[in-house]
Image (cartoon, rainbow, N blue to C red):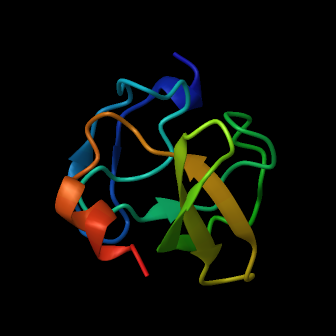
Amino acid sequence: MNTHEASFICIHCGAPVAAAAWGTRHRNHCPHCLWSRHVDMRPGDRSCLCRGAMEPITLWQKEDGEIMVIHRCTHCGTIKANRCAGDDDQQALYDLVP
């Protein structure tokens, strides 16, 4: 199994996270608290060595209407946009709306 297909434990809230989710090919954040880990240089490659916690800071809507979670790495400050997944907690998403 490739590492991008593996389930994981959230580094922020400790919840188990399934690898598969409707609406995304590369699970990269916890559907409960929306936190992530800085592991990708490009979506799904898992080649970033930082491994810092990625805090969800806001939502962004792309021109095509897709909603993205914006994360900022608490270690290096990198900001990344990540697709919402179909099982993301709706209240956690609403809490990110400015």
Give percent across and percent down for residue 44.
67, 34
- Seen in the picture, residue 96 relative to 44 is either above or below; the reply is below
- Residue 74, relative to residue 8: is it above or below? below
Q: Residue furthest top?
A: 1
Q: Estimate the x, y position of residue 4 in percent, counting from the top left.
A: 56, 30
Q: How many marks?
A: 0
Give the residue at x 37% y 61%: 34
Provide residue 66's location: percent of width, then percent of height.
54, 40
Decide if residue 97 is on the left or right side of residue 3: left
For residue 46, what is the image quadrant? top right
Q: In the rendered view, would you say 46 is above or below 50?
A: above
Please name whichever residue, 16 or 71, is drawn nearer the observer in this view of the structure. 71
Q: Is residue 95 left or right of residue 75?
A: left
In the drawing, does residue 21 fall left or right of residue 73?
A: left
> For the point 71% across and 48% down, which residue is it?
40
- Give the residue at x 55% y 31%: 26
Residue 78 position within the rendered picture, expressed as x and y whole percent measured from the top left:
75, 73
The residue drawn where x is 32% and y is 33% is: 86
